Amino acid sequence: MTMGVTEAPQWLVPAFVRSAKAIGANAPTERIEDVAAGLVSSWTSADRRHHAIRHLVDVLASIDQLAEETHDPDAVRLAGWYHGAEFTSARRASYAHKGGEDPIAGAERARRELPTIGVPADVVDRIAAMVEQVHRHSAAASDVDAQALSDADLAGLAAEPQKYAEYLRNIRAEYAHIPAEDYLEARIAILQKLRARPRLFCSPMGQQWEEAARENLAAELTRLTDELDELERTGHEPDGEGAPAQTAAPTPHTGEGPQPRPRELSHERSLADVSTTTLGRAPRSQPRS
């Protein structure tokens, strides 16, 4: 059975407890479970479509595949829990380069919560550091744990076509309140920068995903470029894999009233902004070359 967006499997909280104890947590099990439950609550918030509990499960599964080449797989697993624990798709945040997963806030949360369950300070710092840098997807060659987290976060790019199409629908649904042209332009910019990278995956085992991921990126870029051309020509967004489905969740309530479409927004973005699991944190209008 396919997991729903907000359904947390029963094994998830016990898995967090096991990993926490493996890295030194000495608090009572009930206290560790409380921390895990709070994280599950964050991962199942109503505004998430792709960045939901299934994404967390997929990241943890990919970490398991890479575990044998890590120094501390349970530290990597907990970093996986926190890497997307803080998230917003609100329109204002998206246009201010603050939308999507917030790794800095996730790292701060790890620094607050993990000491309360007895995780040693040096391990907390290590986990927080991995979370802070995951969206750069450029871990040092000597840091095998950070490489594994980065590659696990990107592994969805190598999904089989049906699952990749679902990923695209969920990403678009997450940002359904962003104008189509802004979304397409931002997503195309992300794809172009990703394809320009010498390698998508850092770890030796992660290289198994490189070819399939690049095939998916190339196909998506072609399709989105065609969609943007048609939108500019006709004024209508064509139906496609990336278009939000009619059954998608309603636009999340952000407390913001209608806003005018932003003008003259910067096109520059750092690699830290180019997460494959976000819209790109800055939908905008821009001239096309």
Image (tube, rainbow, N blue to C red):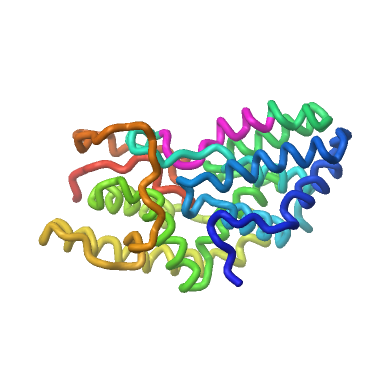
Q: Residue 223: name its quadrant.
A: bottom left
**Any part of residue 204 in sight:** no
Is 88 left or right of 112, judged from the image as shown? left
Provide the major secondary structure of the magenta segment. helix
Residue drawn 50% across the image and 39% down it? 87
Report the front residue among 83 and 4.
4
- Look at the image and say whether residue 262 sits in the magenta stretch: no
Relative height, residue 192 to residue 283 (above, below): below
**Extreme residue toward the left, this view:** 234
Report the front residue among 29 and 285.
29
The quadrant of the rendering that contains the N terminus is bottom right
Residue drawn 83% across the image and 48% down it? 18
Could you say where residue 103 lies in the image, as x and y percent from the top left?
A: 55, 36
Residue drawn 36% across the image and 47% down it? 251
Residue drawn 76% across the image and 47% down it? 16
Could you say where residue 108 lies in the image, as x and y percent from the top left?
A: 62, 28
Could you say where residue 159 lies in the image, as x and y percent from the top left?
A: 53, 67
Could you say where residue 70 lies in the image, as x and y percent from the top left?
A: 76, 51
* Residue extent of the magenta highlight: 98-110
Q: Residue 122: name its quadrant.
A: top right
- Look at the image and say whether residue 107 sits in the magenta stretch: yes
